[in-house]
Amino acid sequence: MKTIETMQIAGSDKLLHRTIPVDEPTRKYRMVIVLVAESEEQGKSPCDERSWPEGYVDRTYGSIQDESFFRYPQCDRCLDKPQST
């Protein structure tokens, strides 16, 4: 059994066209299709791919109250610093 999740914009003919690859030719397959129309808000990301969602830092800054928590030093390549050659 395979689960395929995809998104597609319907054509002006109000049809979705999908080609689904299968494991064996001339074999009977059962398909379950659930269509959910996505609203404009659902399609928008709460943040762009290079930033945190609005208010995230304010809500989470200082949230670790355990004094025994220790953050190990980070290597230069793990930070967003240019590499020196």
Image (tube, rainbow, N blue to C red):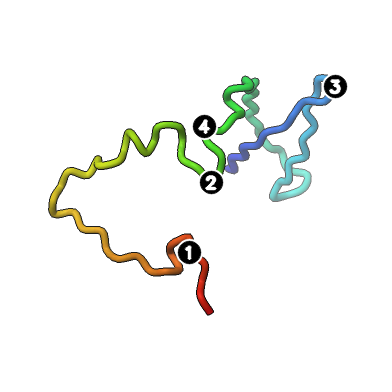
Marks 3 and 4 sit apart, C-alpha to C-alpha, by 29 Å
Residue in front for this viewpoint, 85 or 18: 85
Pointer 1 local density, CA inside 10 Å: few below 14, some 14–19, many at least 20:
few
Of the two numbered discs 3 and 4 on the same chain, state the one appearing first in sequence.
3
Q: Which residue, given by chain and number where applicable, does mark 4 sit on? A: 46
Give the structural element (helix, strand or loop) at label 1. loop
Marks 1 and 4 sit apart, C-alpha to C-alpha, by 26 Å
Give the structural element (helix, strand or loop) at label 2. loop
Marks 2 and 3 sit apart, C-alpha to C-alpha, by 34 Å
Q: Which residue, given by chain and number where applicable, does mark 2 sit on? A: 50
Asked if 36 appears above or below 50 in the picture, the reply is: above
Mark number displayed over residue 81: 1
Mark 2 vs mark 3: give the one in front: 2
Of the two numbered discs 1 and 4 on the same chain, state the one appearing first in sequence.
4
Of the two numbered discs 2 and 3 on the same chain, state the one appearing first in sequence.
3
Looking at the picture, which amino acid does disc 1 mark?
Answer: Lys
Pointer 4 local density, CA inside 10 Å: few below 14, some 14–19, many at least 20:
few
Residue in front for this viewpoint, 69 or 20: 69
Q: Which residue, given by chain and number where applicable, does mark 3 sit on? A: 12
